[in-house]
Amino acid sequence: MAKSRIFTLLALGILLYWFVIPAVFTHNVVEMGRQGKGDQLSDLTIKTWDYYQKGRYVSPNIPKEDANNLKKMIEDDMELNVVTAPIWYVSLEAPNYPKDAFPEGIPVFYHFDGFSGDVHEMNTINHYIGMDPMERGAPYLRMLAPYALIFVAWLMAMFMIYNNRIFNLLMLIPVALPIVFIGFYSYWLYWFGHHMHDWGAFKIKPFTPTVFGDGKVAQFTTHSYPTLGFWLLVAISVLSILALAAKRKYQKSEQAA
C-alpha cells in the first residue's frame, strides 16, 4: 500500500505542477488579452504566467523586453499563449519565411487547454491553403480542460487515500492520458483536413495532416512530434500503472489473510 501511495503521489505531483496549477491560475489569460481586458487580470495570474513562461519558445515577432512578461505583452498587444506543459510540437516550413528567424519553420505547440508558439503565423498559412484557424479546433475541450485536469487530480488523490476498488477502475483514466491526447489530436487534424474552404489561394483535396513525423501540405513541409508534456503524460501513465499494480497486490494479500 505504501508503494502504491508513493507512485500515485509522484504522478499527482507531475500532474499538479505541469498541468493543473498553470491551467487553473492562468485559464483566462488568452481570452482576456484578446478582449482588451488584460488589465483586469489578478497579480497571482500574472505571476503564475510569468513563472511558467520562463524557458518557453518566444516568437521573433515579440520584442526582447516583452518576452516572458505578461504585463508588457498585454500593453504592447503581443500574441499570448497558455503556459501548461506543451504536449505536441508542430512546425511548418514556408518558403517565404526567413530561415534565420524560423530555422525549423513556423512552430506551434498543442496543449490540453490551448496553443502556444506562432499561432498567428500558422493561421495565416492555414488561411492561404483554405483551412480554418487553429482556434476552431476543439473549443469546448480546451475550455473544459482545467476542470478535467482537476477531476483527474482529485481521483488520483482519492485512490491514494482510500482502499476502494472503484478508484482502481477510475485510475485507468490517468493511465490512458497519452492515448487520449493522441486520439483527440489525430481527430483535430482529420477534422481540419476534411473541412477545407474556398477562401484559400488554391484548392486542396480533403486530407489528413501528418500526425507523427514529417509530411507535406501543398508546397509546405510539416514536422509533427511529441514534446515535453507528452513525455510527462507517459510518466504519469507509467507511475499510475505501478500504483495500480502495487495496490492490487496489497488487496489480494488482504483477501488471502
Image: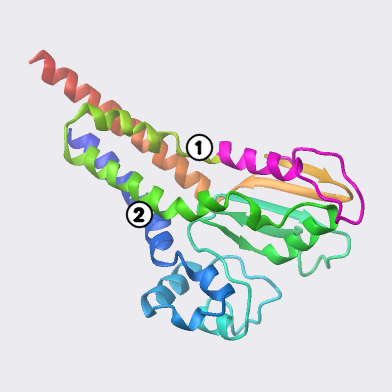
What type is the residue that disc 2 sits on? Leu
Q: Position of residue 112 (x, y in %)?
A: 51, 51
Q: Which mark is residue 16?
A: 2
Q: Residue furthest top?
A: 256
Quadrant assignment, res 65: bottom right
| Secondary structure category for the residue under label 1 | helix
Q: Please give left or right for residue 124 compared with residue 143 in the image.
A: right
Q: Please give left or right for residue 162 compared with residue 181 in the image.
A: left
Quadrant assignment, res 248: top left
Q: In the rendered view, how is the structure colored?
A: rainbow
Residues shaded magenta: 182-210
Q: Residue at x 38, y 56 (%)?
A: 20
Taking the image as drawn, is residue 54 in sight? no
Q: Residue furthest right?
A: 202
- Tell me if residue 46 is in the magenta stretch: no
Q: Which mark is residue 180?
A: 1
Q: Position of residue 51 (x, y in %)?
A: 44, 71
Q: Establish if 138 lies above or below 252.
A: below
